[in-house]
Amino acid sequence: MTIAEISEDTGALMAAIGRRAREAARGLALAATSDKNAALKSMAKSLRQQQSTIAAANARDLAIAEGRGRSAAFLDRLRLDPARIEAMAESLEVIAALPDPVGRVSAQWVRPNGLEISRISVPIGVIGIIFESRPNVTADAAGLSVKAGNAAVLRSGSDSLQSARAIAACFGEGLDRAGLPVDAVQLVPTADRLAVGLLLGGLDGAIDVIVPRGGRSLVSRVQAEARVPVLAHLEGICHVYVDASADFAMARSVTVNAKMRRTGVCGAAETVLIDRNGGAPLIAAVVGALIDAGCEVRGDEAVQAVERGVTPAQESDFGKEFLDAIIALKVVDGVDGAIEHIRAYGSQHTDAIIAEDAAIAERFLREVDSAIVLHNASTQFADGGEFGFGAEIGIATGKLHARGPVGLEQLTTFKYQIRGAGQLRP
Amino acid sequence: MTIAEISEDTGALMAAIGRRAREAARGLALAATSDKNAALKSMAKSLRQQQSTIAAANARDLAIAEGRGRSAAFLDRLRLDPARIEAMAESLEVIAALPDPVGRVSAQWVRPNGLEISRISVPIGVIGIIFESRPNVTADAAGLSVKAGNAAVLRSGSDSLQSARAIAACFGEGLDRAGLPVDAVQLVPTADRLAVGLLLGGLDGAIDVIVPRGGRSLVSRVQAEARVPVLAHLEGICHVYVDASADFAMARSVTVNAKMRRTGVCGAAETVLIDRNGGAPLIAAVVGALIDAGCEVRGDEAVQAVERGVTPAQESDFGKEFLDAIIALKVVDGVDGAIEHIRAYGSQHTDAIIAEDAAIAERFLREVDSAIVLHNASTQFADGGEFGFGAEIGIATGKLHARGPVGLEQLTTFKYQIRGAGQLRP
């Protein structure tokens, strides 16, 4: 990891980062699996060795952020305690143990003229990763990039810049010890916001894809300004639809888990839709479970008529990402009503149906156009680790290239190799 | 196909088109394969029935284009004779006969907690297709969209607008007869260039992806202005590298085919690289074959030293898309020199090696980062039909989602369906 001197000329600095990334990507694309894994393990080792240096840098970031009056939640995301640094190191070791996603033949066929065509997975090239205040995001992001044979350009939020530098220095050490290009993971060393604009412009062809990791305003800026493809994660407006055929106990447990296990994750349920045909008992069962679990329930009139502990829902509560112990609840006309509601208010992220009627469940799975649709399971399974991907860089809510968890496979592309014997096209 | 009255208010017109497309996409996404195939065959039937109407509209377009002083090549692309109309109808029938790309399970696994995860192909949604003066492009574009379950919004160049309207009317008839939404294929009915900008802006979320079919200036505008993903086809700067180990006869025949079969297609070779170790006999063999085939050869000094019929190459001849019977020729230091040259001058489209040495060929196939790399075969095989895709909408030179020929499969995305038994996330 070469940390360039902070340049007066951010343009020249970023152009140089782009050129180095492109060159490093070339080396990394052809690197042996064993070398990439050695680098990842060595990066983990450096993180552990430099734990106190990282902690000291993080303390400086925290002091400045406190001085800026950042919220407690913000400071918590920024904080790197020994457990979080160890978790970063372990994450790199998990990625080292995953199969190499590069060089996999995903299709192979022979044409009538004898041409043998293979579609083979290859790295994308250079990934620009823009994140905000969570410096530990760098480990998963850089680790997945390296394993998939891509060079990464990391752009940290200004609040976590010193922490990110200390972490990135460890990545550089690890790459160097494994004989891989140190520029395979570069951190943008300046807080100048112009650097983000330049990165989104693609650095003159050096950046192949941008992955934003942050809140709505970051993602909006990225989507508005990016001149290169983006694997973006928008909101998770996740729904649980409880059909009249649902098992009551399952409806209660899954709904509570979907909302309350962790309320701040993108796979947390934000709206429960209840089948009108289930009547008052179904409504009472689900609402009671949520209230008992400490959740504020904002219900429509049909829900209010059944349960007194319910707050009246505003129209704006539907389609809202609360990311808190609050849920909107609406009574709908069966699976059709649920599909309609999700179509109008959802974010094509993750939606679930609780039903014993298999035909109704299959209709939901088929007709709801979301990255992840579940039958009789919690929306909180929307996670690369839970999919068995080992690690993820986020959940993509766009439809092209990657949809759902973005793990190693989603950080590769493919090419066609054709083997012939002198064939000419007629 | 609803052709709205040309509105003074292009904004309102385009917004309405977007809403109708989104609604039609929903119906088409769930349509049975048999209905989609019936629609395609019915569209073909209408094209044949309306042949004279289409020809008359085309004659009006041609007269206006001639009045505008368009080139002969331009007028040829614009012209629809009975053979071309029949070819459009046949293309729709070919697409009807292809397997449905929707609903294919591309991966399926069971997690330790019992969750069954399936990755299943689904339509993308709404595709905006912007094309220039070749009205027959509409058939492949609309046909592939319908078969993949997507709604299409077609934007024709102003020179072919009347032809495109007549063709689009046939699509509407075909869709209607098969009971599918007529708005599944809509043509933007105005030549107002503002409509392109609005389409590139995504029509308020209605457009999922843009496919430009046209020259460099169209693609540049699309890439600069698009706020939605683009499957773009940039230049095809295709190389043939002739290794010293090449079979001379094969080197001659493949090089000539790669350049001269059709000089105006994107898979036509534009530069030949010859291994210095092959010496004067190899250079003479390849250059002689090209000159005999009627090709102008622009060679570097090493080539000029061997063959007198060679024009001196300028630096700007390397990396140039001639799309004509002209080729640039350079002597390089073996496969390493070839890989370096292609990296510096290529467009990551299609590149070939002619070699008998298998190890050298494998290095080329592995290290050249292009959508299509070939060993001992002509670059002109860069074509969806030649891949067995049945039909294609273009060759994608970007790296995400689709790379190489864009056929039916590349016009789908996927979703994850998860089947559980009440699992909660711990």
Image (tube, coloured by chain):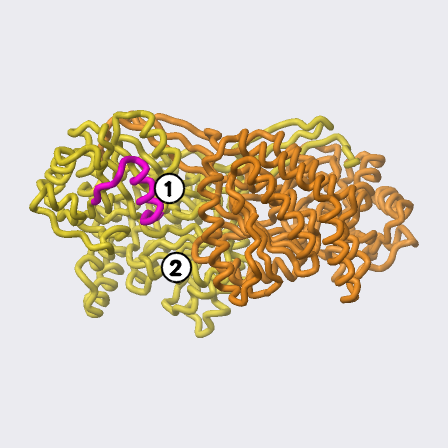
Chain colours: A orange, B yellow
Q: Nearer the viewer, residue A289 or B395?
A: B395
Q: CA distance from mark 2 to mark 1?
A: 30 Å
Crowd rating for badge 2 (residues with CA inside 10 Å; few <14, some 14–19, many 20+) = many
**Is B116 located above or below residue A2 in the figure?**
above
Residue B373 shows up from this direction: yes
Is residue B395 toward the left or the right of residue A385 in the image? left
Q: Tag 2, which secondary structure?
A: strand
Q: Nearer the viewer, residue A192 or A387?
A: A192
Q: Chain of mark 1?
A: B
Q: Position of residue A264 (x, y in %)?
A: 76, 50
Q: Position of residue B223 (x, y in %)?
A: 43, 58
Q: Amino acid at mark 2?
A: Arg
**Is A147 located above or below residue A309 in the figure?**
above
**Is B227 located above or below residue A420 in the figure?**
below
User: Residue at horizontal 20%, vertical 43%?
Assistant: B259
Is residue A411 toward the left or the right of residue B217 in the image? right
The residue to which callout 2 is attached is: B155
Q: Which residues are magenta?
A: B330-347
Disc nearest the viewer among 2 and 1: 1
Q: Main secondary structure of the magenta part?
A: helix
User: Residue at horizontal 80%, vertical 61%?
Assistant: A71
The residue to which callout 1 is attached is: B370
Q: Of marks 2 and 1, which one's residue comes earlier in the chain?
A: 2
When asked about the image quadrant of residue A247, the answer is top right
Q: Position of residue A422 (x, y in %)?
A: 23, 29
Q: Chain of mark 2?
A: B
Q: Amino acid at mark 1?
A: Ser
